[in-house]
């Protein structure tokens, strides 16, 4: 085989390796920024989310850190499919941008719900009253969702998006942005309950961020991902009961009552 033919064979593989490397480096940088921004923050359930601008910046960085490694295979597959176009790199960047835009929208919806709850200030949210039961119930709900048909369908799409890319291909950067958003919607359908777990146990906790990110990666990338999702259902149900009944004994779960000295689930708002 001559050198020109060898370069044609090795080129796509090399470009794929470079793309995955770039995604992982971006994710690593996002982890570093997230850790820096969250150092010293309340890491327990009901932590204050700060102002809208501050939260949006932190949330987008969190999603890049948590989700880019697990979506790297889909991005790589898109890039290889787009390689026949004149400008595959901008299309791939647009695909990732559309994907992150969906998770940004998810975070804004969660922020709006949080603000509504804070405005109501229901006494039942106090950690020394119904707080542990609410947090545990949210975790148990996530466990039940793991067994639902919708979770199964969304997870299968995330694990094998080839049919989606072939059947719903849209050319150009605008089409790539749209496809990235569609893929992000499937991903949100797969993982929204895991994000609910994150909010329940401490959305600003680096420990729980890492745990959820590893779960997402295992479900989407490892060969037994679907079996992992089903096993996780049992684990989340048990974990939810544990939080509700004995939250003080859960390793890594910050007690908001002890942290704030008051007992309310919400920490004081941060003006950042």
Image: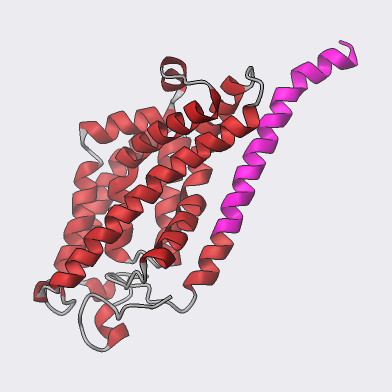
The answer to which of 253 and 172 lies nearer the viewer is: 172
Horizontal and vertical percent for residue 118?
20, 71
Residue 179 shown left or right of residue 257 in the figure: right
Q: Residue at x 38, y 32 (%)?
A: 182
The stretch drawn in magenta includes residue 63: no
Is residue 86 found left or right of 11 in the rendered image?
left
Image quarter hosting the C terminus: bottom left
Q: Position of residue 154 (x, y in %)?
A: 32, 32
Q: Is residue 23 above or below residue 110?
A: above
> Closest to the observer: 46 or 87?
87
Nearest the viewer among 76 and 143 is: 76
Counting from the top left corner in percent of width and height, residue 48 is at: 32, 73
- The residue positioned farthest toward the bottom in the image shown: 261
Q: Where is residue 1 drawn, in percent x and y?
A: 86, 10
Give the residue furthest to the top. 1
Picture quarter containing residue 123? bottom left
Display colour scheme:
secondary structure
**Magenta stretch, overall SS:** helix
**Residues shaded magenta:** 1-30
Q: Is residue 259 visible?
A: yes
Q: Kindly indicate the quadrant of the structure image that contains residue 111.
A: bottom left
Q: Is residue 260 above or below residue 11?
A: below
Tell me if 67 is positioned left or right of 116 in this view: right
Q: Residue at x 63, y 19 (%)?
A: 85
Q: Residue at position x 54%, y 26% from top?
A: 78
Work out whether residue 245 can be spotted.
no
Q: Residue at x 51, y 45 (%)?
A: 68
């Amino acid at each position: 085989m001559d050198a020109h033919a060898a370069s044609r064979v090795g080129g796509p593989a090399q470009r794929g390796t470079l793309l995955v490397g770039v995604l992982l480096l971006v994710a690593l940088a996002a982890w570093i920024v997230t850790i820096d921004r969250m150092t010293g923050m309340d890491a327990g359930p009901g932590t204050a989310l700060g102002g809208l601008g501050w939260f949006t910046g932190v949330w987008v960085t969190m999603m890049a850190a948590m989700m880019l490694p697990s979506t790297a295979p889909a991005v790589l597959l898109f890039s290889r499919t787009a390689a026949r176009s004149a400008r595959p790199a901008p299309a791939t960047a647009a695909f990732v941008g559309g994907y992150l835009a969906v998770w940004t929208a998810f975070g804004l919806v969660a922020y709006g719900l949080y603000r509504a709850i804070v405005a109501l200030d229901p006494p039942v949210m106090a950690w020394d009253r119904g707080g542990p039961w609410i947090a545990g119930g949210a975790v148990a709900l996530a466990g039940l969702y793991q067994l639902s048909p919708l979770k199964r369908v969304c997870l299968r799409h995330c694990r094998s998006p080839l049919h989606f890319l072939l059947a719903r291909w849209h050319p150009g950067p605008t089409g790539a942005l749209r496809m990235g958003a569609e893929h992000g919607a499937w991903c949100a359908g797969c993982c929204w309950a895991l994000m609910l777990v994150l909010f329940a146990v401490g959305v600003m906790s680096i420990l729980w961020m890492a745990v959820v990110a590893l779960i997402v990666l295992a479900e989407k990338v490892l060969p037994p991902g679907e079996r992992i999702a089903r096993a996780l259902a049992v684990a989340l149900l048990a974990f939810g009961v544990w939080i509700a009944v004995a939250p003080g004994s859960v390793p890594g779960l910050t007690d908001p009552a002890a942290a704030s000295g008051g007992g309310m689930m919400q920490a004081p708002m941060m003006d950042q």
